[in-house]
Image: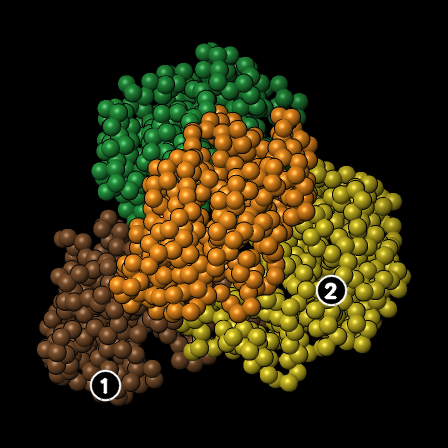
Chain colours: A green, B orange, C brown, D yellow
Amino acid sequence: MNAVTQISMMKALVYQGPGKMAFEDHPKPVIIDPTDAIIRMTKTTICGTDLHILKGDLPSCEPGRILGHEGVGVIESVGPAVTAFKAGDRVLISCVSACGRCEFCRKGMFSHCTTGGWILGNTIDGTQAEFVRTPHADSSLYPIPEGADEEALVMLSDILPTGFECGVLNGKVQPGASLAIVGAGPIGLAALLTAQFYSPGEIIMIDLDDNRLEVARRFGATQTINSGDGKAVEALMKLTDGRGVDTAIEAVGVPATFELCEQIVAAGGTIANIGVHGVPVALHLEKLWDRNISITTRLVDTASTPMLLKVLKAKRIEPRQLITHHFKLADILEAYETFGNAARTKALKVIIEA
Amino acid sequence: MNAVTQISMMKALVYQGPGKMAFEDHPKPVIIDPTDAIIRMTKTTICGTDLHILKGDLPSCEPGRILGHEGVGVIESVGPAVTAFKAGDRVLISCVSACGRCEFCRKGMFSHCTTGGWILGNTIDGTQAEFVRTPHADSSLYPIPEGADEEALVMLSDILPTGFECGVLNGKVQPGASLAIVGAGPIGLAALLTAQFYSPGEIIMIDLDDNRLEVARRFGATQTINSGDGKAVEALMKLTDGRGVDTAIEAVGVPATFELCEQIVAAGGTIANIGVHGVPVALHLEKLWDRNISITTRLVDTASTPMLLKVLKAKRIEPRQLITHHFKLADILEAYETFGNAARTKALKVIIEA
Amino acid sequence: MNAVTQISMMKALVYQGPGKMAFEDHPKPVIIDPTDAIIRMTKTTICGTDLHILKGDLPSCEPGRILGHEGVGVIESVGPAVTAFKAGDRVLISCVSACGRCEFCRKGMFSHCTTGGWILGNTIDGTQAEFVRTPHADSSLYPIPEGADEEALVMLSDILPTGFECGVLNGKVQPGASLAIVGAGPIGLAALLTAQFYSPGEIIMIDLDDNRLEVARRFGATQTINSGDGKAVEALMKLTDGRGVDTAIEAVGVPATFELCEQIVAAGGTIANIGVHGVPVALHLEKLWDRNISITTRLVDTASTPMLLKVLKAKRIEPRQLITHHFKLADILEAYETFGNAARTKALKVIIEA
Amino acid sequence: MNAVTQISMMKALVYQGPGKMAFEDHPKPVIIDPTDAIIRMTKTTICGTDLHILKGDLPSCEPGRILGHEGVGVIESVGPAVTAFKAGDRVLISCVSACGRCEFCRKGMFSHCTTGGWILGNTIDGTQAEFVRTPHADSSLYPIPEGADEEALVMLSDILPTGFECGVLNGKVQPGASLAIVGAGPIGLAALLTAQFYSPGEIIMIDLDDNRLEVARRFGATQTINSGDGKAVEALMKLTDGRGVDTAIEAVGVPATFELCEQIVAAGGTIANIGVHGVPVALHLEKLWDRNISITTRLVDTASTPMLLKVLKAKRIEPRQLITHHFKLADILEAYETFGNAARTKALKVIIEA
């Protein structure tokens, strides 16, 4: 936090308004609040949300912002109020910053922390850079255990807790129960991997892309439906003896897929929305009012990160399955190109090494 | 169950197609299944759903059907498999018939019983008559305790469990929490009465009718909002310091009131739908996807009836407050007239004595 | 239910007072209540509880009683109030009979059914015979799906729901969490198998018998401790970095093993008792009062049987692993001999075929 | 936090070893950690636990310690990492200090915070003084709303959250359910007041002191039993038609009262322990193993304080009922005398004003 640090420069991927980004020199971050940490990034990745930002869909993220909210790194320095970490510690960065003390944090609803939430790579500079400043370090970072697989851990910054909390936990997945996941992109696949913690009986994956459905089958789906023929409802009802599914997870974010979930949820079931929606959907209460269903929405809280770390340690999940490509930070524009053309490149998650 | 019984006649209120009903002679019911009971009705009432049927809104209820799914009476005879009741027992009739054995009943989801559910006065003859046949008697009737107030008990057939289960339980009302109920008709008021079991901090009642809001205040609402000026959202946000409410209960059944609930629910909150909807509503997922909310629907299961009987016995609720008018069964058409013009007559629930 | 049936005889294993039993002729059962079914047994088994009865530990079971509360068979006849089953149906018999209608059944607490509960082979004749009468057939039997493995299903009569409900569900086993099971007999192993539905991080099995610990490792235990040296607490604390376990399942039924659970449960954890205890244990509240723990007891309700059937169908559990020996019904005394000397014979569960 | 502050003196009640305490001059506290606050006490009180310390029962509290863990005051200064409070703020002090970030705090189990928990007046100096240092200020203090009744708030430091969390929440008190509270001292009465948030049907208070039972009746008990004749079990069973109670709250802390709870809990019920126990109790598993009960222990987490503040604001509880005496800080020894002889003085809680 001395003068030299403050004028240091680093490389970073910077959003420059809709459709534009650059990998360029940027001032290295410095500690602002006493609860901050500065981290030298070792590995980061790209999220579907980063593509949304690039399209100009998120006004909260303004031009000039360094993108990225995932990754692992090494602590370079900490503010005077940070007690859980010190320089040199290897850490996992959560996509959500949580003060741990506000009304929402006390309820475990870290996503709505009054001075945090999802701010990294959104309203403050993010992780697709050589260095990042993380606020509320004590309650937003996790120590990396000796010998851990750091690439697997990058999947715990956002995608696995998102699939798990918004999809699996909210969807109340139970042993033996039936589950459909609509959307076999990285988030839907993360829900698929984490749903298996609860041993559901049937896991039906629905998507338009046969390649992704094939991946889903490899990841544990018991059935797949290509919804391209417009007959997904009929196909699913056939698989479930006409009952529908106990849990329907929406992992796309458009009206058609949400309304598909409305049609396939069984009486007494749950629709767990993960998708980021841009427009309203039609909720068919004229059919659903007496069906005893629940619909949930959630921005990931990362409250489950300690649990996921334990599951990972116990080797009951293999997050590396999600990683399809590797790039150097200097090649991050190429990484965006690859990740942004997933249908062609078959990319799921890409690792970017600093 | 002898020949004489089978040709006996009785008086009953019979649906005769959209807009038409008659109070007329009808064969007295007889035991069909071994789990049936025949009950001589002593008190019944009219539900808003009966008015829906009369409008022709429920195709499941066909002309010729005796209406009514609420009431108390005295058992006249029971089938050979009925073990919990005998002739002469005074009983409360639940609006939901439950076999107690199917997949749904085992989960307490009696509303979806595969051979029951809400069938009385819908797909089989109902309670607005001198006698009624109740299927699955052992698990669908409740003994009336010595000295109980039978008029209060009529409120436990449907309206109180509906307000409680669909609104209060599904809405997860908690001590100190904030609650809004949209719609101060009988169902909304039933939710209001039963919400107080959990000592919420604020109970804000929203309606268009000042008389009903005045009733709501008497029944325990801490604040009321007349939404007639189209500014209910602003008024509620002012009352809740801009946060919205932890629970929003929809007790009307039209798009405008459901969408009002979407606007007033706080992050982390719940919208509990009670209303019977005839058309889809717009679900603003573009605003709600990251708000960590739940939306629930439910057809009353009457799983809470034993609990409500205990609360009533403990005098922690006064269901009689809901009763505004009394009629003889012979005057049931007048009772419908009064109940159907509630704005003018200020009717909430009417008691019809056989 | 005609006269011929009533005087038929069959072979059965009959308890004849402490230490005595006989395989002898016994009148074939007939339907008594309209909700009864008569079942021709095809496969049954022996439970540790049967050995307790033979020792004279359960006064509720009187001499002259046919033992056994587990098995599968074919329905021979049903009473007039049975609607879910008919003669010829292949069924799984639950060890708990449930009316589905009493106060306890409505809560899913079938074990305390006022006219049922665990009565088979206890207060009424049981399943170690050619035929058995099962009360409350509609809610106490389960149809056997086409092509199902009937030997695996015998494990669903008692041992798997007992391990699952009393141990795993009551113990709130969670993904990534730590679990110790004290006692690697059939019940402890059933808890071990079903605990894995929830992907716990560590499963530490504790027993005195190295053979059983070896079996436990094969069944999924991640660590085992032979407590014979009196140092199980130290060993477990070492494995858990001094924290203890989130869940400790007691599957023996003596003071020493329960008190071991008290010593190894972590702050915030749960002790789930499965063991049948004959004497009081010392509860060290002077150490536990401020540890935020829960202790649970439970007689299996078999409320989870539908879930277990789905998990079995999905092949997420292999109950056959528990089966070590096969006998013909005529050789049931030999089966008792084998099962009763498990340390020597390495018996877990034995299948007895009629 | 300058040198002058550091040598300031103040008056404080200091523990001086078993049986001994003094009201004497003591150095005024200063900020040690950046998350500390220094508070000028305005009102404090005495807890039963303080009497335990004086008896020498808590070795963790060493001679020289200022006692007290309850009260309200005005912030004099805060450490540099405190962001939620500033000098001049009126605050409620929680008896539990919580960092908000450790593994336990993230689960809401603040009582086991790795750098906090119940330390005030135990392992660090407490609140029975003119000033107190409170660690983890941001997550251990609560702003006092304008116009709030500060004496009522003193009851929220410990006694009300303790009765509520350890007794009512852990005991799962439900509308209409039956509840017995064993011990009508301040803690038992706090459980009684907060149990009414959930509208239980019967609240049976059991104690040896007729005066306290009379107070309990005034506070909302529906029945009282003086257990002096050794026939409390029979009396309670008579009141509950032989079933026992759904929830039994132990609020004394000796074997006899805990074992009474074991005898009166109904099948499926819960024993919630609040009492501080010094010796083991006999757990009659030979009677309870098949009764489907839960037993819970808990050191108050004060996780419910925000809820209690809302209930208080809504005037759904009147904590002032618990206050029987007032003293000046200078007369704190007399306050101890009064509080310590409650049977004679009829003291419940005493307010000590600085």
Q: In this rendering, which labeled residue sits more in front, label 1 or label 2?
A: 1
Residue depicted at 52% across the width and 58% down the height: B153
The quadrant in which the C terminus of chain C is found is bottom left
Q: Amino acid at mark 1?
A: Gly
Q: The residue tagged with tag 1: helix, strand or loop?
A: loop
Looking at the rendered structure, the secondary structure element under dot 2 is loop
For residue D316, above or below residue A161: below
Mark 1 to mark 2 CA distance (whole Å) = 61 Å
Marks 1/2 same chain: no
Residue B2 locus on image (x, y percent)? 27, 65
Pointer 1 local density, CA inside 10 Å: few below 14, some 14–19, many at least 20: some
- Between residues D156 and B331, which one lies in front from this camera angle? B331
Residue carrying label 2: D47
A125 above or below A182?
Answer: above
Q: Amino acid at mark 2?
A: Cys
Residue at 62%, 45% (x, y): give it: B177
The residue under label 1 is C64
